[in-house]
Image: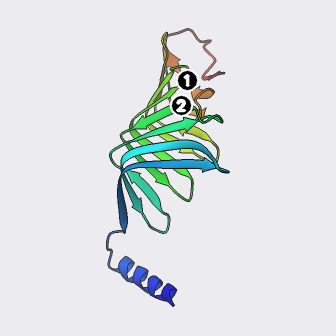
Amino acid sequence: GGCENDLKDVERISNRNISIPVDKSYGVEVIYSDSAQVKAKMITPELHHYNTEKPYYEMPKGVTLIILDENQKESSRVTSDYAIRRENEKITELKKNVVAVNKEGKIFKSEELIYDENQRKFYSNQLVSIVTKSQTINGTSFWANETFSYYEIQQSTGNFDVPQNQDSLARR
């Protein structure tokens, strides 16, 4: 039947090193839902879908990710110049000029932020800056819940007094 043909075609393609089939879409809104509840929307001007063994979406022109609360109101917003969403792993990697803003107006900046849908959190192993009206905090590693209302940042340095022995800062 059709399956055998598909397998042969796939083998032929991989043997000849032909580029992967790509679906390109423009002006796309991707919905992240969890048990019929929309929990996030991702808006991107250009979406490339790579239908490989481990399918992924690439957003070469950047992305806006809007996290919704249980009342479908915006609770945080993340933008970046580039992103990849790994379908099977349910992970979105936001890269280049990543900026997240929470309800309180705190701004989180990094060159990379990873959104883990399964754990419903964001994390980064790159430098992160958190900018509030009164201060800027810098850290080398970071995680936050989806709404960025709770976060932890490691080895933070900033323009405010912290006890010397404290290298981790958590705020609720």
Q: In the rendered picture of this protein, how many numbered marks are placed on residues?
A: 2
Give the percent coordinates (x, y) of residue 166: 63, 19
Which sits earlier in the primary sequence, circle 2 or circle 1?
A: 2
The kind of secondary structure element at disc 1 is loop
> Is 7 rendered above or below residue 133?
below
- Determine which residue is flagged by label 1: 103
- Relative depth, front residue between 52 and 65: 65
Q: Residue 123 carries which label?
A: none
Residue type marked 1: Lys
Q: Is residue 119 left or right of residue 41?
A: right
> Is 66 rendered above or below residue 1?
above
Kindly indicate the quadrant of the structure image that contains residue 71.
top right
Q: From mark 2 to mark 1, how far is it between C-alphas?
A: 6 Å
Give the percent coordinates (x, y) of residue 145: 62, 34
- Relative depth, front residue between 36 and 164: 36
**Colouring scheme, one of rainbow, by chain, secondary structure, one colour:** rainbow
Taking the spot 55% from the left edge, 42% from the top edge, the residue there is 40
Quadrant showing the C terminus: top right
**Badge 2 vs badge 1, beta-carbon distance below 8 Å:** yes
The kind of secondary structure element at disc 2 is strand
Taking the spot 52% from the left edge, 57% from the top edge, the residue there is 87
Taking the spot 40% from the left edge, 49% from the top edge, the residue there is 28
Give the percent coordinates (x, y) of residue 89: 57, 56
Give the percent coordinates (x, y) of residue 137: 50, 19
Kindly indicate the quadrant of the structure image that contains residue 25.
bottom left
Q: Which mark is residue 76?
A: 2
Taking the spot 45% from the left edge, 83% from the top edge, the residue there is 6
> Is 85 rendered above or below residue 98?
below
